[in-house]
Image: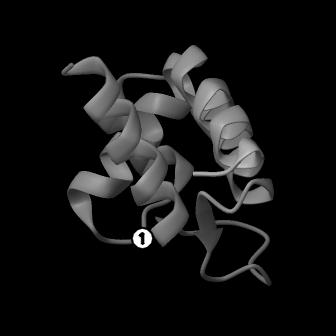
Amino acid sequence: MDEKDWKTLSEVKRSSYRRKALAYLYRTGEPRTPTEVGKKVDVSMNHVSRALREMADRNLVEVINPEAAYDRRYRITDRGRRILSKIREIENE
């Protein structure tokens, strides 16, 4: 991992909203809306939406239908999987 990855890892680890949303997208393996994610991880849709947008900016998740004004669907990227796996590895040491 490079310096940028370590910074991103720290940002995800510090935010329970980012962490929960990323872990859920990893577990489900399917694109989900912020509402669907929020319901599953028990976090308000507003917090989840902001967390997903921030993670999309960091290439941890991607929007698969960016043209949609509503019902945007997000899925985890390979980078998101690597970051989440590294967080889990560190916590299990």
Quadrant of the snapshot with the C terminus: top left
Instruction: Specify few, some or many for label 1: CA neighbours under 10 Å numbering under 14, 14-19, or 20 or more.
Output: many
State the image quarter where residue 7 is shown: top right
Q: Position of residue 91 (x, y in %)?
A: 28, 19
Q: Nearer the viewer, residue 5 or 19?
A: 5
The answer to whether residue 66 is above or below residue 37 is below
Judge from the rendering whether residue 45 lies leftward or rightward of residue 54; answer left or right: left
Q: Nearer the viewer, residue 1 or 43?
A: 1
Q: Nearer the viewer, residue 88 or 22?
A: 88
The answer to whether residue 90 is above or below residue 68 is above
The residue shown at (40%, 31%) is 20
Q: Position of residue 90 (x, y in %)?
A: 33, 25
Residue wearing tag 1? 31
Secondary element at image label 1: loop
Q: Amino acid at mark 1?
A: Pro
The residue shown at (64%, 47%) is 52
* Res 4 seen here: yes
The residue shown at (29%, 32%) is 88
